[in-house]
């Protein structure tokens, strides 16, 4: 096999929000495997530290940044810290998100609605807004937002309207921003995961409850199973690298066929 | 350091229809670079041979096969020949397709409609039908169908392909075929996805070069990235979908268009 440079990320710098667990951790590992330095943000510094230990195995630099990416001052500090450590940002994964409590919409507290929007949608906007000037200056960058299948369809999880609406917003934001910054050499795409075997923040599932969910959900997935978080790595590498140089404004669904 | 495992296709066998030109040639190049053996089929044997000589530099095995994918007996022959040479098929690029004459629908010769459907849609069905049993037996396979952005939208007449109704209808159908087939075979280890390219610097079979140049210049103005795609830019997507590293992806359409339909 030829030692292809097609997906190479050597010398690139990636900032990943919510890189401490779930798909965010996979994004960190994936880009590090292909040579990138990684700034791993999370609200939980211990989890971020765990990711950084995993990432360092690949021989690149990695730092931990604690920040709540629904807060502008914390985002600015996160971006400044990344740039002072690595001089630039080439790749941004806007990945932080929460789910809403699973209750009918008319029983949902307004605070819970606001919390979901503040992180999932407004937080994605704030991160893009802060990182874009750096990418504009170097005329290069790849931004990958984490949307969700729930942003495209209702599908099979009940009572997900706030989450779905926020992720639909992320998709709109991604497509419009992609067109707006295409001439600046910046590509902006979204990954829309279906159900992966992660533990979403805010859901606090007991083992019993998650087994019950599996019994309900698996028959509705054509592949008959959840995705393993590690299965998202290649898509992340593809979108982060120049291998996707002609791709922008797109939503990449990885869902075992649910939305087919 | 580059991970050696991810995207690896060593030991895999890929069959690519219309591999003699354009994006089909890039699909052959892409999978060969990552280690797959390639059966390159084309209606033009000389061009298929050219692709084969190009990709042999990667040290893989490659053969050329002459085929018109709209003909069931020729499709069967293509699959038999691939099996005889390589014993299996792990990856199928259903890539053969043609445009239609640039005239309005009510003036479209019925034969032109039939030809577009026979090659773009029925040809794809015939290839799926012939290759799926091979993949079912080994409980593994990745099929990548070449759709088009014309399979997702018509677009304003002034900023899109004019008079592409039969082509657009056939590519819409390709997307539906991809989704339905993906669901039907998901439990058997076979993944089926589509690539929907926007405008790339290719010279499709039967389209006059001046006509294509005119279209390229015109369309570039409406593409957010400000240019027509280079054919080689599609390789990364092809490799991703062909490899086991897209293992949880099926029934999806991957648009590659410089932001055109964003």
Image: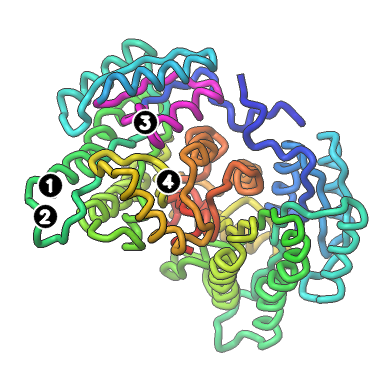
Q: Position of residue A17 (x, y in %)?
A: 32, 30
Q: Residue at x 51, y 58 (%)?
A: A224
Residue A108 is tagged as: 2
Q: Position of residue B211 (x, y in %)?
A: 63, 64
Q: Residue at x 31, y 62 (%)?
A: A154
Q: Chain of mark 3?
A: A
Along the viewing direction, whichever of A40 and A46 lies nearer the viewer: A46
- Which is nearer the N-term, disc 4 or disc 2? 2
Circle 4 is placed at which residue position?
A: A196
- Which is nearer the N-term, disc 4 or disc 3? 3
Q: Quadrant of the N terminus of chain A?
A: top right
Along the viewing direction, whichever of A70 and A107 lies nearer the viewer: A107
- Which is nearer the N-term, disc 2 or disc 3? 3
Q: Position of residue B135 (x, y in %)?
A: 73, 59
Residue numbers of the magenta segment: A16-43
* Magenta span includes A187: no
Q: CA distance from mark 4 to mark 1?
A: 23 Å
| B75 relative to B123 in the view: left or right | right
Q: CA distance from mark 4 to mark 2?
A: 25 Å
Q: Residue at x 48, y 66 (%)?
A: B152
Q: Share a chain, discs 2 and 3?
A: yes
Q: Chain of mark 2?
A: A
Quick check: A243 above or below B221?
above
Circle 1 is placed at which residue position?
A: A112
Q: CA distance from mark 1 to mark 3?
A: 22 Å
Circle 3 is placed at which residue position?
A: A21
Secondary element type, mark 4:
loop
Along the viewing direction, whichever of A232 and A80 lies nearer the viewer: A232
């Amino acid at each position: 096999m030829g030692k292809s440079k097609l997906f190479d990320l050597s010398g690139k710098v990636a900032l990943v929000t919510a890189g401490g667990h779930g798909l965010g951790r996979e994004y960190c590992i994936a880009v590090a495997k292909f040579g990138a330095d990684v700034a791993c943000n999370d609200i939980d510094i211990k989890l971020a530290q765990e990711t950084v230990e995993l990432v360092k195995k690949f021989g690149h630099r990695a730092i931990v940044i604690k920040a709540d990416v629904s807060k502008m001052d914390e985002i600015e500090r996160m971006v400044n810290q990344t740039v002072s450590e690595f001089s630039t940002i080439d790749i941004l994964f806007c990945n932080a998100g929460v789910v809403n409590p699973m209750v009918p919409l008319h029983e949902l507290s307004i605070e819970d609605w606001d919390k979901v929007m503040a992180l999932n949608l407004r937080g994605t906007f704030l991160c893009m807004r802060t990182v874009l000037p750096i990418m504009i200056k170097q005329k290069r960058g790849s931004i990958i937002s984490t949307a969700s299948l729930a942003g495209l369809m209702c599908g099979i999880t009940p009572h997900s309207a706030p989450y779905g609406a926020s992720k639909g917003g992320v998709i709109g934001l991604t497509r419009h921003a992609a067109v707006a910054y295409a001439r600046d050499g910046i590509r902006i795409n979204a990954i829309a995961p279906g159900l992966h075997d992660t533990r979403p923040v805010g859901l606090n599932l007991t083992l019993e409850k998650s087994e019950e969910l599996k019994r309900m959900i698996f028959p509705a997935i054509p592949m008959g199973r959840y995705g393993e978080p590690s299965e998202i790595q290649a898509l992340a590498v593809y979108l982060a690298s120049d291998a996707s140089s002609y791709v922008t404004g797109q939503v990449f669904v990885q869902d075992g066929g649910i939305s087919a | 350091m580059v991970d050696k495992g991810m995207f690896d296709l060593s030991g895999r066998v890929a069959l690519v229809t219309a591999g003699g030109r354009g994006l089909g040639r890039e699909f052959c190049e892409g999978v060969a670079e990552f280690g797959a053996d390639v059966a390159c089929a084309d209606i033009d044997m000389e061009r298929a041979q050219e692709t084969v000589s190009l990709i042999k530099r990667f040290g893989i095995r490659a053969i050329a096969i002459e085929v018109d994918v709209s003909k069931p007996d020729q499709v069967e022959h293509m699959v038999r020949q691939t099996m005889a040479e390589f014993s299996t098929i792990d990856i199928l690029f259903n890539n053969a397709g043609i445009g239609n004459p640039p005239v309005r629908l009510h003036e479209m010769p019925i034969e032109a409609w039939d030809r577009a459907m026979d090659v773009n849609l029925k040809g794809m069905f015939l290839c799926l039908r012939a290759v799926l049993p091979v993949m079912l037996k080994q409980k593994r396979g990745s099929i990548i169908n070449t759709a088009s952005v014309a399979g997702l939208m018509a677009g304003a007449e002034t900023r899109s392909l004019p008079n592409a109704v039969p082509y657009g209808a056939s590519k819409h159908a390709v997307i539906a075929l991809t989704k339905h087939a993906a669901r039907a075979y998901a439990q058997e280890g076979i993944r089926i996805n589509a690539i929907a390219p926007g405008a790339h610097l290719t010279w499709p079979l039967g389209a006059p070069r001046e006509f294509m140049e005119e279209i390229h210049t015109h369309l570039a103005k409406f593409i957010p990235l400000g240019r027509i795609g280079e054919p080689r830019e599609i390789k990364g997507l092809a490799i991703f979908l062909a490899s086991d590293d897209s293992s949880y992806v099926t029934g999806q359409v991957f648009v590659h268009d410089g932001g055109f339909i964003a």
